[in-house]
Amino acid sequence: MSEDFVKVANKNDIQPSHMKEVQLDGQNICLVNVEGKYYAINNICTHEGGPLADGTLEGYEVECPWHASKFDVRTGEVKEPPASEPEPTYQVKLDGNSVLIKKQDKNKNKSNQLELTLTKKDKVEGTDVMSFKFNKRNDQLEDKILLDHAAGQFAFFDIGEVYNDPKGPIRHFTISSSPTEEFIMFSTRIRDSPYKKRLSTLEEGTKVKVRGPEGQFVLHQDYSKPAVFFSGGIGVTPFRSIIKYATDKQLSIRIVMFDSNRDRNNILFKKEFDEWASKNKNLKIIYAISEDDRHEKSLTNTNDWKGEYGRIDKAMILKYLDTNILNNSIFYICGPPGLLKAMHALLQEELNIPKERIKIEEFTGY
């Protein structure tokens, strides 16, 4: 058996017309069985990082579960957008009942890999959200930026030593810091998964492997067209990066953000957003919290809430956006699947916004 091939599964692990995620040298690979023939394709969608093995398989085409991009498992070729970049493929060989994949040249896939040091972690009071900050510049070469990203992009973080987690030690997170800030940051909800438990206990000084940046959920270049953001919960992270960047660079683009949360405690980055809105005349932020919070506050006779109550709907949008903005804006939606689906339907079906002016980023949680 050639040392270039490594066993990743048994043939009976994957039934015909099924897929399975496997790992080889730290790479997530989608292993596919098409009528007894096995193929291996990179498991991370080149569009926005969706896990292909969790999608659907029809013939030789795999469909991403997030945004329906399709790829040919034999060649990695894009068959359906929104993805535009092909997927890497791997050579597969059978040895008895074993399925083997050929190792890639290690330098081939490490051109955009690096190592960052955790410098600080913060827990957002009253929530299950934590932010993690990493060094942005090389310690020996102060002018060398380690991770050069565009506002709104994401990266893959390998924290190592994650056990009993079927998804392994790697997750992708939106980079919530702006390229104008002197650190790399991501923010996430801490759940009970082995990955999140280890992440929450990382000590300052820990080195983490990072691959990226990737993703196309970035601000459009024609600043004459306003940007309208719809965020839900932790989905606000790419908008923090974009808004901070637009404010620091004094971009001429008009930005309106509707930020939906269940209560005031869960409004992430509110202090920063309010500060930036006071500096940026082109920025308007509308906070919306649930009806339950309104009833609770009415019992205490407090009236210091200046935002909106309830879910974002057509009436709320039309309260802040006039016809000119509706007809010329690019709309961005980021949040959990429920919010994404609701906002996408609202924009297209109730406000008649064409799909080419709507950009989406889904947060599915881990």
Image (spheres, helix red, strand yellow):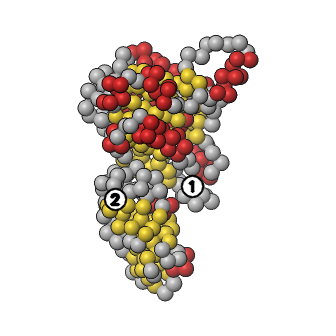
Question: Along the line of sight, which residue is nearer the eye, 206 or 290?
Answer: 290
Nearer to us of marks 1 and 2 is: 2
Quick check: can you spot residue 59? yes
Using the image, tell me which numbered label, if any, was put on residue 80. 2
Residue depicted at 36% across the width and 47% down the height: 214
Give the Cα separation between the discs numbered 1 and 2. 36 Å
Residue at the image position 42 percent from the left and 52 percent from the top: 67
Please name the amino acid that badge 1 sits on: Glu
Residue at 30 percent of width and 56 percent of height = 85
Left or right: where 120 falls relative to 144: right
Q: Residues within 10 Å of mark 1 (few under 14, many from 20)?
A: few
Q: Nearer the viewer, residue 97 or 148?
A: 97
Could you say whether the residue bearing mark 2 is in a helix, strand or loop? strand
Quadrant assignment, res 279: top left
Tell me residue 127's x, y (percent). Answer: 63, 33
Disc on the earlier residue, 1 or 2: 2
Q: Work out whether residue 237 can be spotted.
A: no
Residue sitting at the far bottom: 96
Residue extending farthest right: 299
Could you tell me which quadrant the N terminus lies in? bottom left
Q: Residues within 10 Å of mark 2 (few under 14, many from 20)?
A: some
Q: Which of the labelled discs sits on residue 358, or is there none?
A: none
> What residue does disc 1 label?
161
**Amino acid type of the residue that numbered disc 2 sits on in the rendered structure:** Glu
Q: What element does badge 1 sit on?
A: loop
**Rendering coords of residue 133 (x, y %):** 48, 35
Image check: 227 left or right of 310?
Answer: left
Q: Position of residue 11 (x, y in %)?
A: 51, 80
- Residue lying at 35% horizontally and 19% vertically, measured from the top left: 282
Q: Is residue 332 above or below residue 111?
A: above
